[in-house]
Image: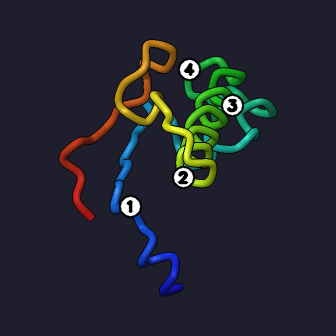
Amino acid sequence: MDSVMTKSTNDIYYLTVDHFIHQSYTDIALLSPKLFAKGIDPVHTIDITRSYVGAFFDQYLKAEPQLLLEGPSADFPEVKFDQDYTS
């Protein structure tokens, strides 16, 4: 645990996705779009999750800077960055 904490970059990402609920971050929206996609194309919900999780891991595990993590994206207008979030 100490090595993880000492190598932390102190970057904090607090993102919200309009119309998402907790289960929207899984592939369950494909099985039951009316319950879990909440008005968003269920395939797009998977694209959102896959893109942001992939960008996060590419940036912090592969050390490849990711433009997607720098702020809002026209590809994903429902994703909001909360710049004032403090943990």
Residue under label 2 = 60
Q: What's the residue at 54%, 52% (across, down)? A: 60
User: Earlier along the polypeptide chain: callout 3 or callout 2?
Assistant: 3
Between disc 4 and disc 3, the foreground one is: 3
Between disc 3 and disc 1, the foreground one is: 1
Q: Which kind of residue does numbered mark 2 sit on? A: Tyr
Q: Which kind of residue does numbered mark 1 sit on? A: Thr
What secondary structure is marked by label 2?
helix
Q: What's the residue at 54%, 45% (across, down)? A: 59
Q: What's the residue at 61%, 43% (across, down)? A: 58
| Residue lying farthest to the top in this orientation | 74
Residue under label 3 = 46
- Comparing 61 with 40, the one in front is 61
Label 4 Cα neighbours within 10 Å, binned few <14 / some 14-19 / many ≥20: few
Look at the picture and state if 60 lies above or below 44. Answer: below
Q: Label 3 vs label 2: CA separation?
A: 21 Å
Q: Label 3 vs label 1: CA separation?
A: 27 Å
Residue under label 4 = 39
User: Earlier along the polypeptide chain: callout 4 or callout 3?
Assistant: 4
Q: Position of residue 33 (x, y in %)?
A: 70, 27
